Structure formats: C-alpha cells, structure tokens
C-alpha cells in the first residue's frame, strides 16, 4: 500500500499577493538603489567601488531614483496593508516573538524551534524595515524630514544606514526561505506564490 502524499499547504490569496509584490518590489529597489549608489558611492566617494552594470536598473541617476521611489511606494504600501491585515485577522499573535519562543529554542522539538526562529526573524526585521523606509524618506525629502534625519547625525551616516539595510533584508529573506523550507519543503514555498 502506497502512502498518500501530504496535501499542499493552503495560503490565503492575500498572502500570495503580498509575497509576490514584495519580491518584485525588493528586486526593483535593490537594482535601482545600486544605480543610485553608483552615481555617488557611499563608500570611497566617486572613486569608490561600483556595482557592475548588469545589476543596475535605470541607466542613470534620475531614472534610478524614479524606479527606486516607485518600487518604494509599492513596497511600503504592501507592508502597510499587510500590517493592517495581520492586525485585523489577529495573526500578529502568532507572527511575532514572545517569551515562549525563547523557551522553544531550548526545547528538543525541532519544529517548535523552527517556528520560534521564524517569529524572532519576523520581529527583528521590523526595526530594520522602519530604518530603511525612514532613512530613504529623509534622503528623498531632507528638509521636510529634518527632525528624523537629525537622529542619524550626518548625511553620510544616513546614507550608510540606508545602504546597510539592503544586506540585512537580503539575509532575512534567505533565512525566511530556509526556515520555510525546513517546515514544509518546497511545497510551502510554492504555496506562498502559486
């Protein structure tokens, strides 16, 4: 007698749309952000290290900024709508870290540990995303957001903080995919998009 394959996980259409929009927006923001970086590198000035052209979007500074801001609004609105969604559906109770997750990390059940790491990652990425959005808005409208940009100390600190959010979000994405794979393999990852 053959064993029946376990059913594919079901995700709400809203979750699928959210993940799809965010992947597209992150790719567009990263490529256009690297175009902006190349126009005036954060590290080393104009003679600093530049990213290769195949990684860039926009072709020049102005177009790179336009792509970046368009993708930023898409990403920010997606996050805002998702935040409202998890608040209204009370999913926030199961999405963010609590003292139980610290206990779960010490447990022997590997699935509980994986879920705990997922919630810790979800919780840790929130301030990073806020820094990315706020520092980006401060660079976009430095006069209007002077009260926020002043918290960074200098223009260079603001640029460095914004730039460093990229690798952190990419690491979060990789960890998020890895943890999802550990819980449900490719089936759960596919269920987030298809």
Image (spheres, grey):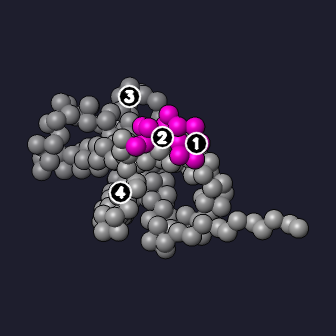
Between marks 4 and 3 in the image, the one whose residue lies nearer the viewer: 4
Q: Start and end of the magenta stretch?
A: 100-114
Circles 2, 4 touching at the beta carbon (< 8 Å): no
Query: What is the quadrant of the C terminus in the image?
Result: bottom right
How far apart marks 2 and 4 lie (CA) works out to: 16 Å
Question: In the image, is residue 97 above or below residue 6?
Answer: above
Label at residue 93: 4
Q: Earlier in the sequence, mark 1 or mark 4?
A: 4
Residue 95 point in image, percent of width and height? 40, 54
Label 3's element? loop
How far apart marks 4 and 3 lie (CA) works out to: 41 Å
User: Can you name the residue that lies furthest to the bottom here?
Assistant: 13
Label at residue 109: 1
Q: Earlier in the sequence, mark 2 or mark 1?
A: 2
Question: In the image, is residue 67 above or below residue 154?
Answer: below
Along the horizontal axis of the image, is 58 left or right of 177? Answer: left
Label at residue 104: 2
């Amino acid at each position: 007698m053959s064993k029946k394959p376990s059913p594919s996980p079901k995700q709400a259409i809203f979750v699928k749309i959210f993940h799809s929009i965010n992947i597209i927006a992150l790719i567009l923001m990263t490529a256009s952000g690297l175009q902006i970086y190349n126009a005036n590198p954060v590290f080393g000035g104009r003679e600093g290290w530049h990213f290769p052209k195949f990684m860039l979007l926009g072709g020049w500074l102005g177009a790179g900024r336009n792509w970046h801001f368009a993708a930023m609004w898409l990403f920010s609105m997606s996050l805002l709508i998702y935040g409202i969604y998890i608040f209204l559906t009370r999913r926030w109770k199961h999405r963010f870290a609590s003292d139980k997750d610290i206990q779960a990390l010490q447990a022997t059940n590997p699935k509980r540990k994986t879920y705990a790491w997922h919630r810790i990652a979800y919780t840790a990425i929130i301030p990073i995303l806020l820094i990315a959005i706020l520092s980006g808005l401060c660079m976009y409208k430095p006069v209007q957001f002077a009260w926020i940009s002043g918290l960074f100390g200098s223009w260079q600190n603001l640029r460095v903080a914004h730039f460093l959010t990229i690798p952190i979000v990419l690491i979060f994405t990789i960890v998020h995919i890895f943890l999802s794979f550990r819980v449900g393999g490719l089936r759960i990852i596919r269920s987030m998009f298809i």
